[in-house]
Image (spheres, rainbow, N blue to C red):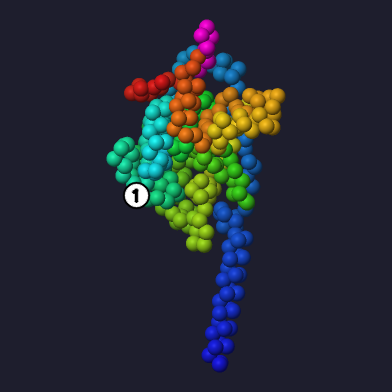
Amino acid sequence: MLSESSSFLKGVMLGSIFCALITMLGHIRIGHGNRVHHHEHHHLQAPNKEDILKISEDERMELSKSFRVYCIILVKPKDVSLWAAVKETWTKHCDKAEFFSSENVKVFESINMETNDMWLMMRKAYKYAFDKYRDQYNWFFLARPTTFAIIENLKYFLLKKDPSQPFYLGHTIKSGDLEYVGVEGGIVLSIESMKRLNSLLNIPEKCPEQGGMIWKISEDKQLAVCLKYAGVFAENAEDADGKDVFNTKSVGLFIKEAMTNHPNQVVEGCCSDMAVTFNGLTPNQMHVMMYGVYRLRAFGHIFNDALVFLPPNSSDND
C-alpha cells in the first residue's frame, strides 16, 4: 500500500514538473535568450524609375552587369513535373540556377542533400552555395518548385541595395514575436547575410539542425531564428505603391480575389506591375506565365526600359 502511494506521489510530482517545464518553454522567446532587441519592421521599396533615368548610360551598363543572382531550388522526387517546368522556364534568367534534391534523381541533374527534412535541405543548400560561390554572386534567391520568379524584376528591386549589408527579403509573416520571410514567396539573402548565416551553422545553440525537442517549426521560421542571432531581420519587399512584390499565391487566385473584393478595379486591386514572384503554380501555369511575361508583345509598341539586365551568356534564354 505504501509502495503504491509512493508511486502515485512520484507520478504526480513528475507530471507537475513536466507541466511546469512546458509552461516555461511556452514563455521563452525565440531569439537571443534574455537579451531584448528592438527592431522596427522595415518595408523596403523598389527604386524610383525617375532616379534610374538620371544615371548615365555607362553607369547603367555597369549596374546591369554587377548584379549576379544565384538561384537555389529545393525539390523532391515527387516534384518531377514541376522541376521540369521550372528548369524550362524562369530559371534560365538566373545568372546560375541549381536544384537541390532530397535524394538522387536520375531524370534531372541535382545536388543530393540526402535528407527529406526541409530545414536540413535548406541549410545544406545555403552552406553549399556559400562555400562554392561566395566570390561569384552577391545575391542568393531560394525558391520552391511551385514558385515562378521574374529575375529581372528582382534585380531591379535590388538596384539600390548594397549586398555588403545584411539583407533578408521577401514576403514577411509575423508569428508571435518572430517575423520571418515565407518560403512560398521566395527568400533573398545578400552575400553579407550568407556570411553571417554560414558562421552560425556549426553553433547548435544558435542555429540548431532541429527546430526543438518538443515541437518542430517550419524551415522558413528556423532560418529567421538563425538569422536573428546574426543580427539579420526579415524585411518586406514592396513597390512604390506599397504593394507586395513577393507573392505567396498565383496570379489567378489574386485576380479572383480582386474580382470579389474590388470588382471595379480588378487590375489595380490585384498585383504589383513589378512583381518578383508568384506561388502555387502548376507546370502548365508556369509555361503560361513564361509566355505572358517574356514572349507576348503588342505590335507597334516599343518597350525601352532605362536599364537592361542581360541574360547569362550560356543561357538559352527566352
Say left or right for 295 vs 249.
left
Range covered by the magenta-colored residues: 298-307
For image coordinates 60% across by 56% down, the residue present is 29
Q: Quadrant of the C terminus?
A: top left
Farthest residue in the top direction?
300
Mark 1 nearby-residue class (10 Å; few <14, some 14–19, many ≥20) = some
Residue identified by numbered label 1: 114
Find out whether residue 301 is within the magenta segment.
Answer: yes
Find out whether residue 38 is within the magenta segment.
Answer: no
Farthest residue in the bottom direction?
1
Say left or right for 255 vs 64.
right
Q: Is residue 143 above or below residue 220?
A: above
- Under mark 1, the amino acid is Glu
> Residue 153's x, y, as percent?
51, 26
Badge 1 marks a residue whose secondary structure is: loop
Q: Is residue 26 above or below residue 171?
A: below
> Residue 41's x, y, as percent?
63, 41
